[in-house]
Amino acid sequence: MWAAVAVWLAVQLIVIADVADIPQISDARVYQRLAEDCADRGVWYPTRAHIENILGHTDYPPYLCYPGLINLMALVIRLTGTYKTMFWVNMAFNCLVAAGIWRVGRRLAGVSAARLCVAAYCLMPYASLMVGETMSEFPCMGLVMLSLMLTRRGAGWLAAAAVVMMLAQYVRTVALFFALGAVVYMLTEGYGWKRVCVYVASFALAGAALGAVNLRLSGHVSFTSTTLGVNMRDGCVTPHVADMAANDSMIIAECTGLDVFQIDSIQRRWTLAWIARNPGRFALDAGPKLAAQLGSDSHMVLGRGGYMPLDEEKPLQKGLIVFWLWYPKVYNAVLLAAMAAGIWIRRRRLAGPDGAVLLPFVCGLALAVLTKAEVRYNLPYTPCMIYFASLAALALLRRLRPKPQSKTTD
């Protein structure tokens, strides 16, 4: 474990030192631009302009995206003068993820399993190379893991855990799946309804406070992104080009002059209507989506559609390219096989805490089927996968361990 941790920390430092000067592109660039705009104007995201001034405005996408991330990055820019400080923040959140994986693994399966969980996470390529990107993965995962570490039996601890989990979903909505998993864990571990109510009430109050803040900032109550509609449309309708073209013209006409909340509602409604008309196509798309969600992506850091393009002329970055093209595929294949074995080994415990660990992962797969699938969208659930994979690895190591020979006396 400590060897894996040392390599993991070293790779992050190398990425921040050697790769962080590369400009962000694609979605990462959008988040950076929004944060810089807010920092320059002395405002927080979203403003009324982000919600209402959308069509034909190249600076603002027609949806709200990761408000917690953008406001955190805007704060970092205000304090340090550069978005690149966010890479160090990513590293800090990444360490929180590793600490949370250790704590949860030890709590549910013991020290040996926790060591394997941490080692497996540190060896995951995305867990080190993505620190040089202005994306939502590490802030969301770090806050989720901090919340899970705070989930103890005391009412104060549970209230704090709920507030942190609300902040995690403010960064990325999928944290709601982990909040649901936390509630299931408390129920299966006998926390009692009073403690569960404290957690749920604290989560709701934190959400109400967040909604009130956003109402004051923008004139609208909002808690998180409004990307569900566009992701549903992109994942369900867009792959079918003829349907996409027909829907595009009608959606654009219907959305003219509307705000991001209304556009999100319209796109969700259009997509659900398309699914009702084409249930067979929707069902057939599920397989490729799940394969994409659980696959490996060599383009996430490279320049070919990724978020942090590497330069093949620089030796270190060329080495990272070679590493990135092959290692993720091997790691991912081993992880999936071990996870499946671990779920089978622990199948009788899925009605207990292990089921709470598996729940966010299952919810993530369902969301991928309803919307669109990418390897990046699966990253928040990798701790769940690693937990079961590590249990399978532990069972294998115990089988391979030589049995002590019994001593005989004459």
Image: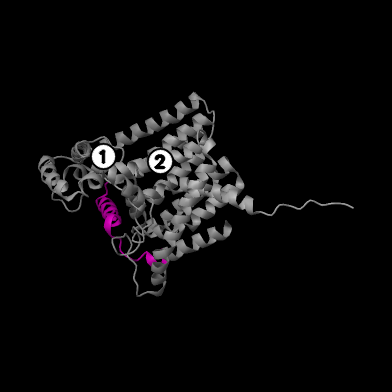
Q: Is residue 201 above or below residue 289?
A: above
Locate residue 359, reporting x and y percent.
Answer: 43, 38
Locate residue 192, reporting x and y percent.
Answer: 52, 25
| Residue 161 among magenta residues | no
Question: Which residue type does callout 1 highlight?
Answer: Leu
Quadrant of the image containing the N terminus:
bottom right
SS at badge 1: helix
Q: Report the residue that reaches farthest toward the right.
A: 410
- The residue sitting at 48% across, 55% down in the picture is 334
Q: Is residue 266 above or below residue 408?
A: above
Picture quarter containing residue 267? Answer: top left
Left/right of residue 309 with respect to residue 163 in the rendered view: left
Main SS, magenta region, reads: helix
| Marks 1 and 2 in Cβ contact (< 8 Å) | no
Q: Report the residue that reaches farthest toward the top.
A: 194
> Which residue lies under the disc numbered 2?
362
Task: Provide the residue span drawn in magenta.
Answer: 16-43
| Residue 23 among magenta residues | yes
